Image (cartoon, grey):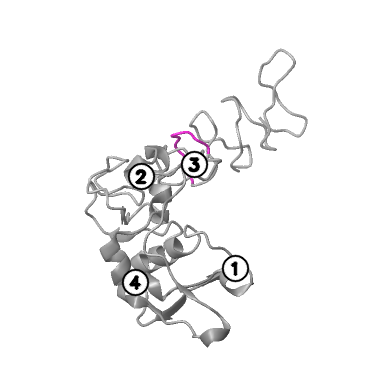
């Protein structure tokens, strides 16, 4: 893993998250030593994370608990692990090439070795710091099944695997009742896995296709709102509702 950046959020944080997510299946190994021709520095074991609204480079979060709850889980892995965890992960095997030491650009390099098959439940588009199954305390759907986006009560970044719902968490944190993330910001019911309109009902045109209802009214078969000059729903020219 290599970048042209010296930002630890893009470098050591990514490496630590990958190592933690995949456990003993992946490890760091030493990078090639170029001798005196290229001065190398070890990877960082600790770093600070700037606040979201920081424009000066001087305002930092004190810890993950200092982050706004609405984005806490999304940014959890950009924070440095504890000193003990960093040592166990051997982040110092990463390599930093500093511009002032070599009269070059800045580079970061980490060399991974896969030593065992990856466990299926550790592969996620939102890579967790740890994966646990069936031990979470927050069941958004109240169906007795731990949801994929639920956080364990210990607050340690443990992500649960939901055995029946693929993606229960909308962008705004509202859970869809059918377990499909429709990204419409509404806790709606979508009976067939398609698009849910903004009033939370299935929006289906005369051909049985999903469509979009912007204001909760009737939608024509093009997926557009059909409204007459008095603001009432009407019939469009191509036979839709």
Q: Viewer-nearest of labels 2 and 4?
A: 2
The image shows residue 235 at horizontal and vertical percentages of 71, 25
- Which class describes the residues within 10 Å of circle 2: few (<14), some (14-19), or many (20+)? few
Question: Could you tell whether 133 is left or right of 38 in the image?
Answer: left
Front residue (pair 90, 146): 90
Q: Quadrant of the C terminus?
A: top right
Q: Does the magenta portion include 191?
A: yes
- Where disc 2 sits, the SS reads loop
- Where disc 4 sits, the SS reads loop
x 36%, y 65%: residue: 21
The residue labelled by disc 1 is 99
x 38%, y 48%: residue: 73
Q: Among all residues in the image, which is located at the extreme top?
A: 230
Q: Which callout, 2 or 4, points at the residue further toward the start of the chain?
A: 2
Q: Which residues are magenta?
A: 184-192
The residue labelled by disc 3 is 52
Q: Which callout, 1 or 4, points at the residue further toward the start of the chain?
A: 1
The residue labelled by disc 2 is 62
Q: Are marks 3 and 4 in contact (CB under 8 Å)?
A: no
Q: Mark 1 to mark 4: distance in Å?
A: 39 Å
- Which class describes the residues within 10 Å of circle 3: few (<14), some (14-19), or many (20+)? few
Q: Viewer-nearest of labels 3 and 2?
A: 2
In the depicted structure, whether residue 208 falls above or below residue 92: above
The residue labelled by disc 4 is 119
- Where disc 3 sits, the SS reads loop
Q: Mark 3 to mark 2: distance in Å?
A: 13 Å
């Amino acid at each position: 893993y290599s970048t042209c950046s010296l930002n630890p959020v893009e470098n050591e944080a990514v490496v630590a998250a990958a190592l933690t997510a995949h456990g003993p299946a992946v490890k760091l190994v030493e990078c090639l030593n170029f001798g005196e021709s290229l001065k190398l520095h070890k990877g960082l074991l600790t770093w600070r994370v700037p606040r979201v609204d920081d424009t000066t480079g001087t305002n930092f979060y004190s810890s993950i608990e200092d982050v706004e709850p609405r984005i806490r889980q999304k940014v959890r892995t950009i924070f440095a692990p504890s000193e003990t965890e960093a040592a166990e992960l051997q982040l110092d095997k990463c390599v930093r090439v500093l511009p002032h030491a070599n009269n070059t650009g800045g580079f970061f390099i980490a060399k991974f070795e896969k030593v065992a098959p990856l466990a299926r439940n550790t592969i996620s588009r939102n890579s967790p710091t740890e994966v646990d199954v069936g031990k979470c305390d927050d069941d958004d759907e109240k169906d007795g099944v731990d949801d994929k986006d639920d956080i364990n009560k210990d607050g340690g970044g443990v992500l649960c695997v939901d055995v029946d719902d693929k993606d229960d968490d909308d962008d705004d944190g509202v859970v869809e009742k059918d377990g499909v993330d429709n990204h419409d910001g509404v806790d709606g019911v979508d009976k067939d896995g398609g698009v849910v309109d903004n009033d939370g009902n299935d929006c289906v045109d005369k051909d049985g296709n999903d469509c979009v209802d912007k204001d909760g009214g009737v939608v024509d078969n093009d997926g557009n709102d059909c409204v007459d000059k008095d603001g009432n729903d009407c019939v469009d020219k191509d036979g839709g509702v």
